[in-house]
Image: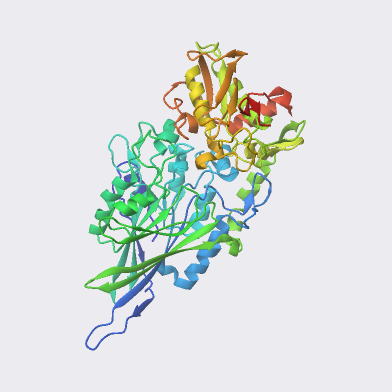
Amino acid sequence: MPLDRRKFLKKSAVTGAGVALAGTVATPAAEAAAPAGRGKKPVKRYALTVMGTTDLHGHVFNWDYFKDAEYRDTDGNAQGLARVSTLVNRIRKERGRENTLLLDAGDTIQGTPLTYYYAKVDPITAEGGPVHPMAQAMNAIGYDAVALGNHEFNYGIETLRKFEEQCDFPLLGANALDAKTLKPAFPPYFIKKFHVKGAPPVKVAVLGLTNPGIAIWDKAYVQGKLTFPGLEEQAAKWVPKLRSMGADVVVVSAHSGTSGTSSYGDQLPHVENAAANVARQVPGIDAILVGHAHAEIAELRVTNEKTGKEVVLSEPLCYAERLTLFDVELAFERGRWQVGSVKASLRDAASVEDDPRITRLLGDEHAQVVAYVNQVVGTATETLTTVEARYKDAPIIDLISKVQEDVVREALAGTEYASLPVLSQASPFSRTSEIPAGEVTVRDLSGLYVYDNTLVAKLLTGAQVRAYLEYSAEYFVQTAAGAPVDVDRLTNAGGRPDYNYDYVSGVRYDIDIARPAGSRIRNLTFDGAPVDDAQRFVFAVNNYRANGGGAFPHVASAQELWAESTEIRTRIAEWATAKGVLDPKDFASEDWRLTRDGTPVF
């Protein structure tokens, strides 16, 4: 049933009231009668299919904007809502649309040049601005409800609210609260009734939960405005309410993985990846659509500690590469609907073609973004690549550091910190980024810096810089001096991702991988002299790291000297455009190397 967006938003955005949405399905649902004994009425049965996606990150088309080509990977995956639309249409045809629900578990409006373009270049917040491509696509496909992801907040609350206004479905976040009133700032739940001939309707409630890490990662936007308590405590509050409201089925859409771990350390008392904890601790949940972790989980069964009942979890692969199906079987017994079984499975976007309705709908927007990313901003004297950047000091990463140093140095000119040396942090985000010799485009530079991070300047001491580097060096697998070096097994110790390994430019140091973690940084110098523990440095760092992402020591609590809202990716493009020519002699520096007992590895 169409939502009255103005009436709904006026209530939910400010007070959290009026969040019980009811969608009514008028068409009689498919039903079956169990064999009846003599004198007994047949048992009414109903089959519900809940479909789900997550971590779409702006993928509408099976297109790689960074390569200006159709998306391909070695596993044969295909991406995009146009493919998902085909899958959804197929399931609705098989099961009856009136017997299906379509959900998403968040991270929708950030992640590709398409989403960046409509947040920053041709923003949806401008007067008379465009409708967001993700809103257009998801409206056309017919999503029923979407949970908030942490990346929904990357462009600020104004952009998120405008996106919300443009959607024909609610954005759910039971644990996204107004910081002053502690009331929900977004609708906590969505309720839909499914009609069954000869029986009461089946009432399905969807509870939306988002990630408490938002308070860290997007502190600049949400501090003092929104607060994000833990998923477990908010589920424990809302699930009983939904049951008391007559919900026969409770589905949670959670932008939270299943591992029970956090990527930001102990800065918040709430677990980042808490979906399995919610299933284990909170009674009354039938299924959880999992997000955030970019993992593929066809079906995970978790036993609730209080009831002994199994809760079924499923996480479809990100970027619209998979669609989850929860098949819920119910029976009308003892005057109410009872869930008999829940099964989960996945459908593969690579098994179908694009829905032409979606590609036609957004063809113009796609063409605009393709033209934007293919703008030439300069030339490069040689090819720069990240192929070896995980274990060798690569000039292409030095480019990021140089841009950040220059921007921060200019920003602090004339301040009391202007005379302090500037160090800069950067990570090898991708193993396949390349800036080719010759013409350099926006997409070449965007492919180097794929995240929408912004720049922050912090104040660190020499001792803190050393501790930061020691933590970063845990990324390498300890390798004895005489042992062979296999570069494919040298990094990602303990499962640490590449984006949580940092170069630091402006100082020089060795990383001795023969030594145990915590004692690997050797010969740390600045300007040829050993770094003094009390020496002060300005540290140019991305906002994710500055706010605690990756749990690097000291940086989150360090004094902030300056920050901005312009993306680092944009700063790199501006720097390259101003230079006209990318020549490594203008930005490359030898800051670090891997050693074993003092002998260079490479």
Quadrant containing the N terminus in the rendered view: bottom left
Q: Please determine whether, in this image, residue 83 is positioned above or below residue 67.
A: below
Q: Residue visible at 35% across and 31% down?
A: 224
Closer to the camera in the image, 199 or 274: 274
Percent across and percent down for residue 201 are 30, 69
- Mark yes or no: residue 452 visible: no
Q: Is residue 393 toward the left or the right of residue 130 in the image?
A: right
Q: Residue visible at 67% across and 23% down?
A: 589
Q: Is residue 56 toward the left or the right of residue 220 in the image?
A: right
Q: Please determine whether, in this image, residue 360 is positioned above or below residue 373.
A: below
Quadrant containing the C terminus in the rendered view: top right
Q: How many marks?
A: 0
Percent across and percent down for residue 552 are 47, 30
Q: State the colouring used for the structure image.
A: rainbow
Percent across and percent down for residue 332 are 28, 73
Closer to the camera in the image, 21 or 443: 443
Name the outermost residue toward the front: 482
Percent across and percent down for residue 132 are 52, 47
Place residue 358 in its image quadrant. Answer: bottom right
Name the outermost residue toward the bottom: 38
Q: Is residue 382 toward the left or the right of residue 390 in the image?
A: right
Q: Residue visible at 44% across and 45% down?
A: 149
Closer to the camera in the image, 224 or 10: 224
Q: Please determine whether, in this image, residue 412 is positioned above or below residue 182.
A: above
- Mark yes or no: residue 224 visible: yes
